[in-house]
Image: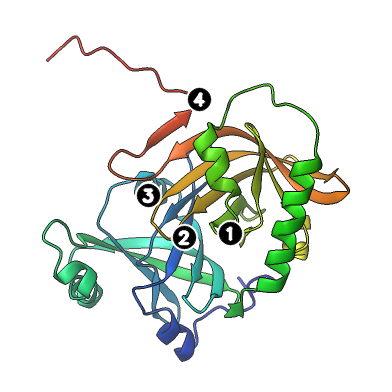
Amino acid sequence: MNTKRFPYDQFSPSDISDLLPAMKIGVLGTVTPEGLPHMTLITTLMASGPKEVVWGQFMEGNSKEYIRTNPKTGFLIMGLDKSFWIGQAEYTRSAHEGKDYDFYNNTPLFRYNSYFGVHTVHYMDLKGQSGKHPLPMNQVTIAAIKTLIGRTLAFGKSKKAVMNRWTQDFISKLDNLKFLAYIDASGYPVLLPVIQAQALDSEHVAYSLSAFTNELVAIPPFTPVAVFSMALTMQDVLVRGTYQGTRRLGGVKCGIVQVDWVYNSMPPKPQQIYPEVSIQTITEF
């Protein structure tokens, strides 16, 4: 799958080495049964060979179910030096033993953990990847400031209370990491950094197009998208909605996402927040 976005069909030796450290950000994009993008923080993502992506599972979650019904995935991995890779891969198999299983469970994070370890290793065939790129911090900073100006000067009021105040404030924090995902024409998720994104109101997320311009303007209007926001304190939230195209907010050209779904992916209880899930009374034991 050599494309302009993903020109490399394998990882170089330096890629494999750079993706090895445990201290990094890994985000996996999957496809829901409804054909919508979903994202999960998977810090164990790495390259186990030139054409293989691997990750270790130590918690349950939706993404582990989604890959079994639709093996097409996208991924984004970011190192502590702010370099990142994006790509696409196809899930092939899982294992409960082997060299990668032993590797994960002998890392300091899991070897000395009394409560949990990696119990399953998932393997994916690499379809294409971008190569290593530095995060353009100057562009990201300018885009974040422009987004802040645009949302401050924008007028209007949301009709629905989709995102609560905590979610709005969390997405709007300038020092939080944010990523956007959508499904491309081949059915694979595409993940992009969108660190400048901020909540416009309780049902819209906005982001200046000053950073990752070409990648963001390529998203067709009315495409279902997901936005994953996370802090290095391991707090995170996932929202999903429809990309509305671009609009000027206070003179700033921004992409707009109308949010209609909010998901708490943090332990101990990952669950849907909006639309609110009704509590069912237990009548049989």
Identify the residue at image location x=78%, y=56%: 217
Is the residue under label 1 in contact with that under label 3 (CB below 8 Å)?
no
Identify the residue at image location x=52%, y=51%: 229
In the drawing, does residue 248 fall left or right of residue 18? right
Q: Which of marks 3 and 1 is in front?
A: 1
State the CA–CA distance, disc 2 to disc 1. 8 Å
Helix, strand, or loop for circle 3?
Answer: helix
Q: What residue type is labelled 1?
A: Leu
Q: Can you identify the residue that label 4 sits on?
A: 275
Say few, some or many: other residues with alpha carbon within 10 Å of mark 2 (under 14 / 14 to 19 / 20 or more): many
Q: What residue type is labelled 2?
A: Val
Helix, strand, or loop for circle 1?
Answer: strand
Say few, some or many: other residues with alpha carbon within 10 Å of mark 1 (under 14 / 14 to 19 / 20 or more): many
Q: Position of residue 234 (x, y in %)?
A: 38, 55
State the CA–CA distance, disc 3 to disc 4. 25 Å
Q: What residue type is labelled 4?
A: Pro
Q: Can you identify the residue that label 3 sits on?
A: 68
Is the residue under label 3 in contact with that under label 2 (CB below 8 Å)?
no
| First in residue order: circle 3 vs circle 1 | 3
Q: Position of residue 164 (x, y in %)?
A: 53, 31
In the drawing, does residue 202 fall left or right of residue 206? left
Q: In this view, does 5 lie above or below 57?
A: below
Q: Can you identify the residue that label 1 sits on?
A: 191
Helix, strand, or loop for circle 4?
Answer: loop
Q: Can you identify the residue that label 2 sits on?
A: 27
State the CA–CA distance, disc 3 to disc 1. 20 Å
The mark total stands at 4
Q: Position of residue 53 (x, y in %)?
A: 41, 71
Q: Which amino acid does label 3 sit on?
A: Arg
Say few, some or many: other residues with alpha carbon within 10 Å of mark 3 (under 14 / 14 to 19 / 20 or more): few
* Relative depth, front residue between 13 and 89: 13
| First in residue order: circle 3 vs circle 4 | 3
